Amino acid sequence: MRLLWKLVILLLLINTCAGAGAPSRPDFAQEPSDVTAPADSPRSELRLRCAANGRPAPRYRWKQNDTDIDFTASRHYRLDGGDLVISGPRAERDAGTYQCLATNPLGTILSQTAKLRFACESVGNICDSCGAENMQLLLYSC
Ligand SMILES: *[C@@H]1O[C@H](CO)[C@@H](O)[C@H](O)[C@H]1NC(C)=O
């Protein structure tokens, strides 16, 4: 009977120390990359991608221009898994640099920087349907 208990405890120890149950630091599976959004035909949503492995599963945060985004205060930004979703993206408010952070009890990792830019769409050398406010940008880039 004693031996049996020792065996059970040994098996439990092996089980927690190896394999799927072992805690691990976050590790990026997907980091955000630069995005150029059309300034002339706004999309309803923009998505910056971020995903990390780790055990326990990491929690995510995002920085915009080095400042933490406060998701509780914003309807404009939301988290979808690790992704940052920007609704109604606008150049004045959203252009800048973004970084994703993934955290679990074993550590925090910071992603590469992704730039979000807004530009007129061009067809060959001709910018298509840019509004007056984008004329300058249009003249420079065409
Ligand atoms: C972020 O920084 C860039 C470059 O300084 C600036 O053009 C942009 O307006 C800033 N974006 C925000 C949302 O503060």
Image (cartoon, rainbow, N blue to C red):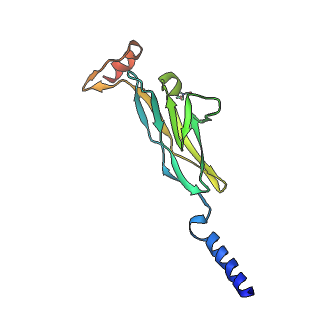
Residue 38 vs residue 142, the one in the foreground = 38
Instruction: State the residue lying farthest toward the front.
Output: 1
Q: Residue at x 42, y 14 (%)?
A: 133
The quarter of the displayed image where residue 74 is located: top right
Instruction: State the image coordinates of residue 83 (x, y, percent, origin top left).
Output: 51, 41
Instruction: State the residue lying farthest toward the right.
Output: 2
The quarter of the displayed image where residue 39 is located: top left
Q: Quadrant of ligand 1?
A: top right
Instruction: State the image coordinates of residue 104 (x, y, percent, origin top left).
Output: 64, 52
Instruction: Judge whether 18 appears above or below 81 on screen.
Output: below
Asked if residue 26 can be seen in this view, the reply is: no
Q: Looking at the figure, which quarter contains the C terminus?
A: top left
Instruction: State the residue lying farthest toward the left.
Output: 124
Q: Residue at x 47, y 36 (%)?
A: 47
Q: Looking at the figure, which quarter contains the N terminus?
A: bottom right
Q: Residue at x 36, y 23 (%)?
A: 120
Instruction: Judge whether 117 appears above or below 137 on screen.
Output: below
Q: Residue at x 51, y 22 (%)?
A: 92
Asked if residue 75 can be seen in this view, the reply is: yes
Instruction: Judge whether 27 appears above or below 12 on screen.
Output: above
Tally of numbered tags: 0
- Answer left or right for 131 relative to 113: left
